Image: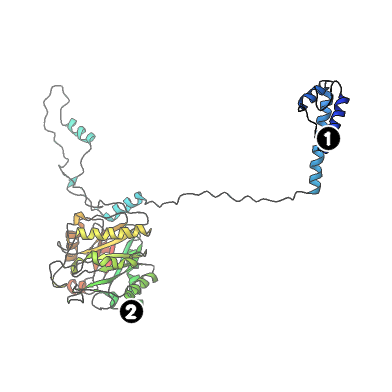
Amino acid sequence: MRCYGKMEGRASDLSKAARRTAETRENHRWLEGPSCDWDGVLQETMNLRPIKPSEVIVVLCAIAVAGIGATLLLQHRHPRTQTNVVSAPVSTVRPPVVPVLDRAAYNKKMLEIANLPPREGCSSAPSTAAHEEKRARAYRTVAKARPVAYVTKEPVLRPCPAPLWPAHAAYPDAGAILPFKRVVAYYGNFYSTRMGILGEYPPDKVLEMLKSAAAAWAAADPSTPVVPAVDYIAVSGQNVPTRDGKYRLRMPASHIEKAIRMAEQIHGLVFLEVQPGWSTVEEELPRLTPYLKRPNVQLALDPEFAMTDGKRPGTKVGTLDAAQINYAARFLAKIARENHLSPKILVVHRFTKDMVTDSRAIKPLPEVEIVMDMDGFGSPVLKLSTYKAYIASQPVQFTGFKLFYKNDVIIGHHLMTPAEILRLSPQPSYIMYQ
């Protein structure tokens, strides 16, 4: 083969040709002619003598030694600094733990406060096995014998009716106060000395009396812790028209804040009472939203001063329907959900049949526990009969009992004690003093 001259046969000729080619490239004087097939030249040269394996090994060893030397030289010129790397703990993102109500404990406490009396004069429905056993004994065992009357000394009892309590209602969410604790509240308004104890004495005196009353209830029922509360009339029904003609007076924010501060001093609750007058529950509750967003603020409705027939408050007993009470419950539930609060408490006062209509339609919610409170004054006999007729016989969820320091004593000559009230079935979870 030819490449810019004669290069055939020998390696010396190839070396001479290579030198001539390099010199030609350096001087940029290329010869014209066909291109050189350098791959063919190298292959032709390698074919001149076979490469021994020992030579390959020598070459590979030389390459390895050169690589090691280069590595050591680089390490000597650029020493590696030792860095202690502290591995950070691996954090695992877990979903927030949602508290769950202990339903077993709830059911147990609900059965406890139901305080069911012993069943007399009736019997539980017998099981199928027991029924078949008695039936078998009523016949002779002799084959083909006719049945005869079965005489026994066991009395024939009618089946016991299903108990009304515990009431069938939705389980509350975790963090519910009732039935695990009992609320003992003092009631009133700061403008009036006749509407309750809150306006009759200075705040410090009121709180001392409230703590004493709460301690008496805790001693009477050690299994149920007591939570003190301030029940403040935030919207008061009036027997004279107000500026808007609604016959109700809204208390100033400073008074509501005062009631809240009083409760905070004893780590208690606040109940904001609403007496609508000629207004409505739907109109009054939104104004109280900023207060109801607080964890310790609850709500109470007084149907006595909710007038629907044009009569002035105080001239007759008013009324609320289940629909209005359910509206209040949904209103509270929305606040509790949006603000991630424990279940709220809604108290509804009652001492006559017509004060609350369609009570069976009242629906407690997981976010709202409902208390039906016996709100009548008088002798113990009258109060107990009112409680039985309008509270215990029409179960909603929880019950309450109101005591009047003056009217109960003046009319009935006796202020009922915790021990007397705890004999009720069901036992009240909300106690109010006026």
Residue 280, image x and y in percent? Answer: 21, 66
- Quadrant (top left, top right, bottom left, bottom right) of the N terminus: top right
| Circle 2: element type | loop
Q: Quadrant of residue 329?
A: bottom left
**Can residue 412 be seen here?**
yes
Answer above or below: position of 350 versus 31. Answer: below
Residue 259, image x and y in percent? Answer: 33, 72
Tell me which amino acid carries mark 2: Pro
Q: Quadrant of residue 182?
A: bottom left
Give the residue furthest to the front.
32
User: Badge 2: how crowded within 10 Å, few (<14), some, or many (20+)?
Assistant: few
Q: Which mark is residue 24?
A: 1
Which sits in the foreground, 252 or 275? 252
User: Badge 1: how crowded within 10 Å, few (<14), some, or many (20+)?
Assistant: few
Tell me which residue sits at (23%, 72%) in the image. Answer: 236
Q: Which mark is residue 231?
A: none
| Circle 1: element type | helix
Q: Which residue is mark 2?
A: 202
- Total label count? 2
Answer above or below: position of 49 versus 127. Answer: above
Residue 306, image x and y in percent? Answer: 18, 67
Residue 423, image x and y in percent? Answer: 25, 60
Which sits in the foreground, 26 or 201? 26
Tell me which amino acid carries mark 1: Thr
32 relative position to 219: left or right: right
Mark 1, mark 2: which one is toward the viewer? 1
Q: CA distance from mark 1 to mark 2?
A: 119 Å
**Can residue 434 be seen here?**
no
212 relative position to 145: left or right: right
- Quadrant (top left, top right, bottom left, bottom right) of the C terminus: bottom left
109 relative position to 120: left or right: right
